[in-house]
Amino acid sequence: MKFNILINKKFIIILIGIVISLTIALKNLEKFDKIVNNSIGEPKHMMVTSDMRHVWKLAEKFRFNLSNGNNFFEALPIFDRAFLQPILVGYYYHILGKEIYKKNDKGQLIIKTQNSKLGILIIQILLYYLSVYFFIIQFSKRFNQNKDYINLIILSFLCFEPTILQWASSFWSESLFLSMLLILFGSIISPTKSKILKLFSGILLGLIYALKAITFFYIFPIILFFLFVYKKKIFSTLIFISGFILVISLIGLNHHQKTGNFYIMSSKHSFYSYYHYFAAQIFSDRNKISSMEAMEKLDDLENTWRDKNNITIYYPIENTDIDDLIKNTQYRNKFFLNEIKQNPLYFIKLYLKRIVAMCILSPSMVYDGYTIDKGSPEAKNNAKEYFNKNLKRNIFYSLLIYFFILIGFKNFVLKILKSKKVDFYDKFLILNILSILYFVSIAGLWGYPRYFTPCLINISFFFANGLNDFLSRLKK
């Protein structure tokens, strides 16, 4: 009876979350499903901005290929900057028989407005809350001892926390990312010992990589968790790994079919990596020159290296021979690491500063992004104030959330020190700590709060423990 009551509470919480997300989605579409001119007079869709423009262009290309008789595999794009999301968006519009783009009065290609975008958001919202339900059910089955209130706090956090909630009613890939991670976590903690479930988990992680290239090495924290749990029984771990390898092999085969080369890593993510964004900054500080001078110097050095080694890079880089691209990427990575070695203190300070910026929760980031114009005079003349209008509010909100997270983390550490043993739940929390460290270490240098989004799942467990402990003390 107690379990049934708990299930009913979970259902009500999830239902409320769905209603809230759908309401936000409807209001966003009503207000922002529009084409406006930016500061330089170019048309842009208010909701499909920044990196999403590339995703939707790929989606239109995929849809066009399908509509013109190509089979699914022939129509697949290569994994350059995005892969899974444009496939999903393109296939959605292919099923509807609708185009994504049209030409405006000036002959410019623009995204169509009011062309069934709500369907994408409805599917996305339902998928997210179904994944939350799946995870919390598995979590409750595995960790049901004296954790009823913690379960409800975790569920409420995942359903209502505004930094999470904002993604479900947007066209960013973060909502799908969170959904897939929740299903992955639910699968690996499931009491079911099915080998099929382990294979499914590996396949799912491969699909997560197809969605977010940043997760390519995320398999290692999961493997450590499996080894920690199953110890010498590594068969389940091998099944999981085989599922992951299956997906990335298919990606490599798709690349081989399209380009004649078998490769797995996204070409643009590899080429436009740390070197592209941060090498000049470190070089500038080390040589006491301006950022512009540093960029020019690095360009000269790279061009000289290309000429010496007979390397030709075409732009866009997908037109470049893959062997030349790999060699040039290796040059960039080696150069970047050398800069770090020569200026370690500056790099550490920069890294830590960006990590702090990344970890600041930003509940209105999506909404704010609809009206931001990076080319506007205000953005150019006073960028710090323009892009950080809500910084004080975000810091206050973050400190409030982290207050309870620190209590939960303290309780976790003290429990292990006191009992001198690690149970399955502790191992799961260790996995979440490894997950946070993974995303922060890989993406922290960019300093974007959006890259902290997957960590919101991980911190929810410590938040729930801390809030539950805090409320329990208040009752005494």
Image: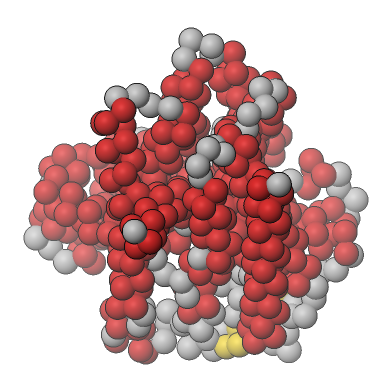
- Residue situated furthest left in the rendering: 288
Left/right placement of residue 256 relative to residue 228 reads right
Left/right placement of residue 357 relative to residue 67 reads left
Residue 393: percent from left, percent from top? 34, 78
Residue 300: percent from left, percent from top? 27, 53
Which quadrant does the C terminus fall into? bottom left
- Residue situated furthest top in the rendering: 232
Residue 269 visible at all: no
Residue 460: percent from left, percent from top? 46, 53
Residue 373: percent from left, percent from top? 46, 82
Rendered view: 280 above or below 332: below
Q: How many marks?
A: 0
Q: Which residue is drawn at 64% across and 63% down?
A: 13
What is the quadrant of residue 205 in the picture? top right
Observer-nearest residue: 80 or 467?
467
Q: Which residue is drawn at 31% across and 28% down?
A: 419
Observer-nearest residue: 49 or 433?
433
Residue 403 visible at all: yes
Q: Which residue is drawn at 19% across and 44% down?
A: 339
Q: Which residue is drawn at 73% across and 89% down?
A: 105
What colour scheme has been applied to the protein in the rendered image?
secondary structure
Rendered view: 1 above or below 403: above
Observer-nearest residue: 452 or 126?
126
What is the quadrant of residue 463 in the picture? bottom left
